[in-house]
Image (cartoon, helix red, strand yellow):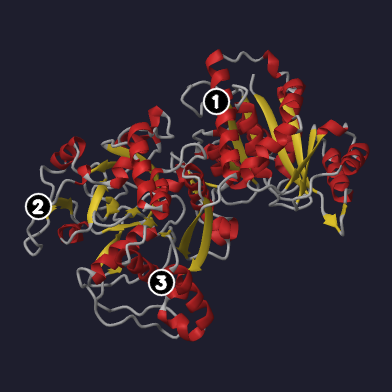
């Protein structure tokens, strides 16, 4: 029988329920147990895919293409598991399921109500998903961590609270525990308990009794014993059921903070975990995880050498927009034993108009850029700030500063090369009175920004719906074939028998004219690609995608002939997925999002190479050798299959009337 641990919150949201949930799961995993996690988001959206990054933080993408809350990223990173879209429950998903069942007549003419139909649907969903294997063991998890988003008392979360009240009786006392996270504010040196008393009172009134109260303090000062005793007295729990979670030097210390307060021992007794059979192999694996985690946190405390990274992005005012990018940088910095310093640069502040409108920001942005040890341009959507990204990439390329471009950053690196190396430039960009770029100029462009550009180096993926925004991008885990390998040669033969063919607008295979490109033989990328070395010198790798636009295949021969090498392509050789410059300390761009699969104990290869290069060439060489011998991908073995198989698993089919040979989520005509 699966054991369930519910994490609820009170007083205010955004105080760290996700980290506490992930830390609890990690500690249980160190005992040898198999752990999964579910996040409940009470908003009406079907998923997080259509929300702005500044609205709810980054959109985290899973292997199956699910666009979910960023807390699932925390679960995957801490627990080293691979979750599915169904591990994120929203009000929209539940209501859609109930309404679909009502339309099919499955309720047999009954009046469909919040109780019992919606609450039963929530419980059924949790019980079903909790039994799905999430690691290489292929076995049902022993523990399911359930995080309830928002705070107790919110109108929108009421059906979920009621569902959990019923669920505790459905699974039994020994199989359900509740950890309630509450804010303990510090006012003039006094830790106030009244907010916690109030929220626990409200929780008990709804039929849920906390087994543990995690008191969140937004300061480095620990929870005082007198405060703990007071909460124990007025919240009807013993003092050992009150945990203090104060600010620590990094979130990776939170598991150790909880462990020191006996959370594992308490849960072992409360949920009768000793009754579970744990194989010796799993026990030893858990002990290994604990030892490596403690070693990582100790080493982090001894990092004195700094590595300064400038992140040039569109959403820098809200740091959670780049949560996974930040974590991937941190994991890599841990590995090379350097202290990470991130300087945030709004990409639009680098553009010439900013020199007139806000000269202070303009000069501060450029001052940060020119002093960077490494420059990172992450993903994003829309034209705003794109010219600033191109300027930052130009600086990194010309000044030999280590560079990493992700998704939009990859596409902007292609435009920068086309403009400044191929010379595809026209009149200087002009802005309308509203600040938007006017169309009709002849410089290399993306059709995302200038739909009618005569030089479209970045184009809309032909099979993607223009009418539906949610779930219609290229999403989820996809393979990339490293060029120059035996597998790449096979893919080249598979693609209509010619490496220079692609599928045109009419769906037929066309031949790309390369007669105008310089004629010279390129050394096989497989022999020099740093990216391939970082992935263990394999023929192919898997990363998660989330994009609507791609490099125009008609422009690829000209780009490659001029020296911009696409070292990684899709299985058909049609989609450019990794670019790299040979004669540069580190200049790499990726269409996928490798940050989504980074782990504290297994950093993302491109991020590790980027950070190592920013620390120095000798450290990069050391990491390249280490990765080539010891890298292991974080994905379950069964997920690393062909793109065609992955599409079938995610129920993707060709869009009617689509072009090229690509695929997308089906949409109605």
Position of residue 577 relative to residue 542, above or below, is: below
Q: Which residue is mark 1?
A: 288
Residue pictured at 43% horizontal, 30% vertical = 636
Label 2 crowd (10 A; few <14 / some 14-19 / many >=20): few
Q: Which residue is mark 3?
A: 388
Q: How many marks?
A: 3
**Mark 2 or mark 3, which is nearer the start of the sequence?**
3
Q: Nearer the viewer, mark 3 or mark 2?
A: 2
Asked whether 126 or 368 is in front, the reply is 368
Query: Residue 521 bears which disc, if any?
Result: 2
Disc 3, SS: helix
Earlier in the chain: of badge 1 and badge 3, it is 1
- Residue 668 appears at what percent x and percent y? 39, 51
Q: Residue at x 67, y 46 (%)?
A: 149
Label 3 Cα crowd, 10 Å radius (few <14 / some 14-19 / many 20+): many
Q: Is residue 479 visible?
A: no
Q: Looking at the image, is mark 1 or mark 2 earlier in the sequence?
A: 1
Q: Is residue 645 left or right of residue 138?
A: left
Q: Nearer the viewer, mark 1 or mark 2?
A: 1
């Amino acid at each position: 029988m699966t054991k369930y641990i519910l994490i609820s919150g009170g007083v205010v949201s955004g105080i760290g329920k996700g980290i506490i949930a992930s830390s609890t799961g990690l500690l249980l995993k160190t005992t040898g147990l198999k752990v999964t996690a579910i996040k409940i988001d009470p908003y009406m959206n079907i998923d997080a895919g259509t929300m702005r990054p500044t609205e709810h933080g980054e959109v985290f993408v899973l292997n199956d293409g699910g666009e979910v809350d960023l807390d699932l990223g925390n679960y995957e990173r801490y627990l080293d598991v691979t979750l599915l879209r169904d591990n994120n429950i929203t009000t929209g998903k539940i209501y859609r399921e109930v309404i679909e069942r009502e339309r099919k007549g499955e309720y047999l003419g009954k009046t469909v109500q919040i109780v019992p139909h919606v609450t039963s649907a929530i419980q059924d969903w949790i019980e079903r998903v909790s039994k799905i294997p999430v690691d290489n063991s292929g076995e049902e998890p022993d523990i399911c961590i359930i995080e309830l988003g928002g705070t107790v008392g919110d109108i929108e979360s009421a059906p979920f609270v009621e569902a959990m009240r019923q669920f505790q009786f459905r699974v039994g006392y020994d199989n359900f525990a509740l950890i309630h996270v509450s804010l303990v504010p510090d006012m003039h040196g006094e830790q106030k308990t009244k907010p916690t008393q109030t929220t626990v009172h409200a929780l008990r009134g709804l039929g849920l009794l906390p087994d543990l109260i995690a008191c969140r303090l937004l300061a480095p000062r620990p929870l005082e014993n007198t405060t703990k005793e007071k909460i124990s007295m007025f919240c009807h729990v013993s003092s050992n059921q009150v945990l203090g979670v104060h600010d620590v030097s990094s979130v990776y210390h939170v598991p150790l903070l909880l462990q020191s307060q006996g959370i594992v021992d308490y849960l072992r007794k409360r949920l009768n975990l000793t009754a579970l059979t744990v194989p010796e192999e799993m026990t030893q694996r858990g002990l290994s995880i604990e030892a490596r985690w403690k070693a990582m946190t100790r080493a982090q405390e001894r990092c004195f050498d700094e590595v300064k990274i400038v992140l040039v992005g569109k959403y820098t005012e809200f740091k959670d927009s780049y949560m996974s990018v930040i974590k991937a940088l941190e994991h890599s910095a841990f590995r090379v034993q350097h202290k990470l310093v991130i300087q945030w640069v709004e990409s639009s502040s680098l553009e010439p108009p900013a020199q007139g409108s806000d000269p202070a920001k303009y000069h501060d942005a450029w001052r940060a850029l020119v002093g960077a040890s490494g420059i990172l341009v992450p993903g994003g959507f829309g034209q705003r700030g794109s010219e600033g990204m191109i300027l930052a990439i130009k600086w990194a390329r010309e000044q030999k500063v280590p560079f990493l471009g992700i998704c939009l950053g990859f596409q902007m690196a292609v435009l920068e090369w086309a403009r400044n190396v191929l010379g595809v430039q026209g009149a200087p960009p002009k802005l309308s009175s509203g600040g938007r770029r006017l169309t009709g100029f002849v410089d290399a462009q993306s059709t995302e920004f200038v739909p009618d550009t005569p030089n479209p180096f970045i184009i809309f993926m032909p099979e993607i719906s223009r009418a539906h925004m949610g779930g219609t991008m290229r999403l989820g885990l996809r393979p990339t074939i490293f060029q120059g390998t035996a597998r790449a040669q096979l893919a080249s033969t598979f693609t209509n028998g010619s490496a220079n063919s692609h599928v045109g607008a009419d769906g037929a295979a066309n031949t790309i004219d390369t007669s105008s490109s310089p004629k010279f033989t390129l050394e096989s990328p497989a022999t020099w690609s740093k990216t391939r070395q970082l992935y263990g010198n394999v023929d192919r790798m898997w990363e998660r995608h989330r994009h609507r636009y791609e490099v125009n295949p008609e422009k690829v021969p000209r780009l490659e002939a001029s020296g911009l090498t696409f070292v990684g392509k899709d299985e058909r050789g049609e989609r450019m997925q990794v670019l790299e410059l040979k004669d540069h300390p580190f200049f790499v761009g990726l269409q996928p999002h490798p940050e989504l699969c980074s782990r504290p104990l297994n950093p993302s290869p491109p991020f590790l190479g980027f950070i190592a290069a920013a620390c120095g060439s000798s450290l990069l060489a050391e990491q390249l050798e280490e990765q080539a011998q010891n890298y292991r991908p974080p994905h379950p073995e069964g997920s690393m299959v062909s793109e065609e198989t992955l599409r079938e698993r995610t129920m993707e089919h060709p869009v009617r009337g689509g072009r090229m040979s690509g695929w997308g989520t089906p949409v109605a005509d």
